[in-house]
Image (tube, rainbow, N blue to C red):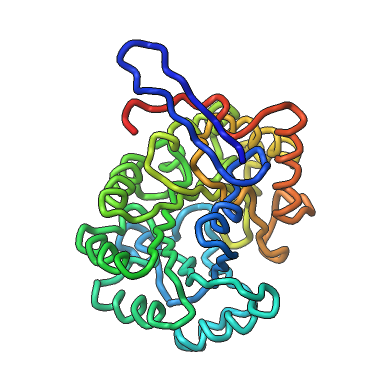
Amino acid sequence: MIEVEQQHTMEGDKPSRRYSWEGDRPFNDYAQWIKQKYGFRMQKISLDAGFTCPNRDGNLGRGGCTFCNGTSFRPGYCDPGLNFIEQVDKAINFFKPKYPGCGFVAYLQSYTNTYAPIQALKKIYEPILGHPEIKGLVIGTRPDCLSHAILDYLSKLNEDYEIVLEIGIESTLDRTLGRINRQHDYEASVAAIGQVHLRGLQTAAHLILGLPGENYEDMVSHAIRLSELPIQSLKLHQLQVLRGSVMAGQYIKNPSSFNLMTMEEYVNLLADFLTQLRPDISIERMSSQAPAHDLIAPVWGKKNFEITRLVEKALLETGRFQGMNYIPSLYL
């Protein structure tokens, strides 16, 4: 077990806190956290519910965020031609031989999965949750697509099932959010996560490291700002320039305006980032692998677990660990 304690010595500060997580890794590993919580592996299964995005259909804008290539990545077992129950059954049949005894959580990942009227959401969520082997639902969405009515509905579902909202923050800097055509500011993320927390729902945050215009210090500072929010887990990945995206054209036209890190630079960044991150935030992912046919740059030739191992090695070799430099916020 890893234990981290922060002490306050200044007058008016909160008392010292102690954080701990199972395992001997120098970061709070999500998989270990899940196993500690449930006693067994919990496998996410990706489903395609046919959602779109307000930044694509003209409600907020068209063309989407500049990093998005407009295609919906889905694993091979996910067939959008099937209904929800058929998708669940196919995914479970795929994973059961690989992970005997695991539990299953449905994962609505592609686009904005709260972007519909409540009655339409009910017709999607409730049949999925009604499947006897589904323990909960992870819903990928934007911070500006979470009305009070939707959150109240999800809070009600959370009484019987575990509901997690995976919210795309992408950056804590408004200048970056404007540059990538995100169509919301950082305060929208802060407000949405606060409302999610008030209703007892869990938040998984999503962040991209290496967006245009952000330097090393900017990216490490994201860890400090995110640590002030009541989030439970974090997904990180490097900026990837994808074919078909607005960013692909920008990159081809002016590659010097991009901060595409080498793998070594990214690993070192993550090690520094994690030392500033609140220790109880579990790390779901440290990198991403776009399909080879979509990826323009950077091409590292490493799988996600290999990047994670390199970050772990960098931390261990220097005696660092998640949260060692974290200063608790007075507002948490």
Give the quadrant of residue 141.
bottom left
Q: Is residue 238 visible?
A: no
In this picture, is 91 found above or below 139?
below
The residue under the point 44% across, 35% down is 227
Give the quadrant of residue 255.
top right
The residue under the point 44% across, 29% down is 17
Q: Is residue 84 visible?
A: yes
Q: Nearer the viewer, residue 294 or 29?
A: 29
Residue 178 percent coordinates (x, y): 41, 42
Location of the C terminus by quadrant is top left
Give the quadrant of residue 275.
top right
Instruction: Report whether 170 appears left or right of 253.
Output: left
The residue under the point 29% across, 77% down is 122
In this picture, is 102 found above or below 175?
below
Instruction: Report whether 196 appears left or right of 4.
Output: left
Q: Nearer the viewer, residue 316 or 291?
A: 316
Residue 293 percent coordinates (x, y): 71, 66
Direction left: furthest residue: 149
